Image (cartoon, rainbow, N blue to C red):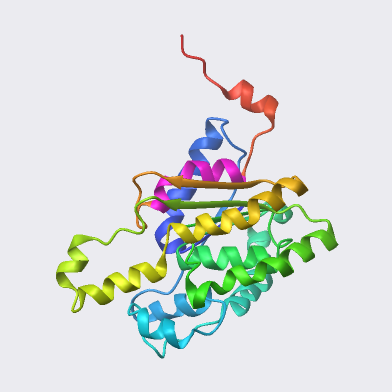
Amino acid sequence: MLYVLDGNVLFGTYAAAVRTKALARESEPAVVVGIASGEGEHAAERTLDFTISQRSAREKAVVTEMSPDQKVGGAESFFRVIQQEIRPRVVKVAPVDDQRASLLGWSLGGLFVTHTFFAHPDAFVSFVAVSPSIWFNERAVLREIPAFKARVAQNHLHPRFYLAVGSREGELPPSRLKTATSPEALRVEMRYYDMVHNPIAMNAMLAPWFGRIGTPLRFKVYRGDTHNSMPWAVTNAAVDFAFPLPAARRESATIRLK
């Protein structure tokens, strides 16, 4: 089972990928659940649900995409909704093994996945964070790593994590520069996001430790992809990571071209 955040945008893509790959015996059959985020007049609810803490004064001054009074810090409440309301409903209507569920999110949704991985590593079998907004509140999510390591060691957990980012996510689109009231302020904002280097830094912090405990940590920079193309660029890899085939079945599914 794969829970996909921003399901109103991404559900169709991941449902089709899972179905097609399962029919071709390239991955395990699975159920995809799209969890819709706020849009239109409710768009601010997405930011509330996916963020983990309050924002610093510096961030409020730099990040113009959010209003200074934007409500944030609702991630734990949203996590409880998933655990206590959504997952029990899914189990009632679909023949699934809820103990094998995975979680995928993009952008602020990727931040939510990363936080959930650190705070609740036993909640899902696999976690996929696509272009996570690690920048939020001065990279607050990275400060959760020491407690996460202690939690995993104490409970002998083996959580699986896939981290992906596009190589062009740090670029400033010319169209935005042309329409920006202050191009320099926009450049400062993009530098604050640091969308490419923040995931690279997080991987560097985690990879040696994951290697020692023998738990899969996958990290990939997708060459040529932007923030908005990443959810589609990573689709096949994400599905393969969430639903890996046993080695014997992978070999039997391989088509050899002569």
What's the residue at 59%, 63% (across, down)?
114
- Residue positioned most to the left: 178
Q: Position of residue 141 (x, y in %)?
A: 58, 70
Residue 165 against residue 81 in the figure, above or below: above
- The reply to whether residue 140 is in sight is yes
What's the residue at 41%, 68% (across, down)?
193
- Residue positioned most to the top: 258
- State the extent of the magenta-drawn residues as a range: 230-242
**Residue 217: in magenta span:** no
Q: Position of residue 213 (x, y in %)?
A: 77, 49
Q: Position of residue 214 (x, y in %)?
A: 75, 45
Count of picture labels: 0
- The reply to whether residue 234 is in sight is no
Q: In terms of depth relative to the viewer, which is nearer, 94 or 85?
A: 85
Q: In terms of depth relative to the viewer, which is nearer, 157 or 140?
A: 140
Residue 75 against residue 176 in the figure, above or below: below
Q: In terms of depth relative to the viewer, which is nearer, 17 or 58?
A: 58
Q: Position of residue 10 (x, y in %)?
A: 43, 56
Q: Main secondary structure of the magenta part?
A: helix
**Residue 238: in magenta span:** yes
Residue 155 against residue 207 in the figure, above or below: below
Q: In terms of depth relative to the viewer, which is nearer, 115 or 210?
A: 210
What's the residue at 68%, 58% (across, down)?
124
What's the residue at 46%, 56% (across, down)?
11
| Relative horizontal placement of residue 136, taking residue 156 as reference (left or right) | left
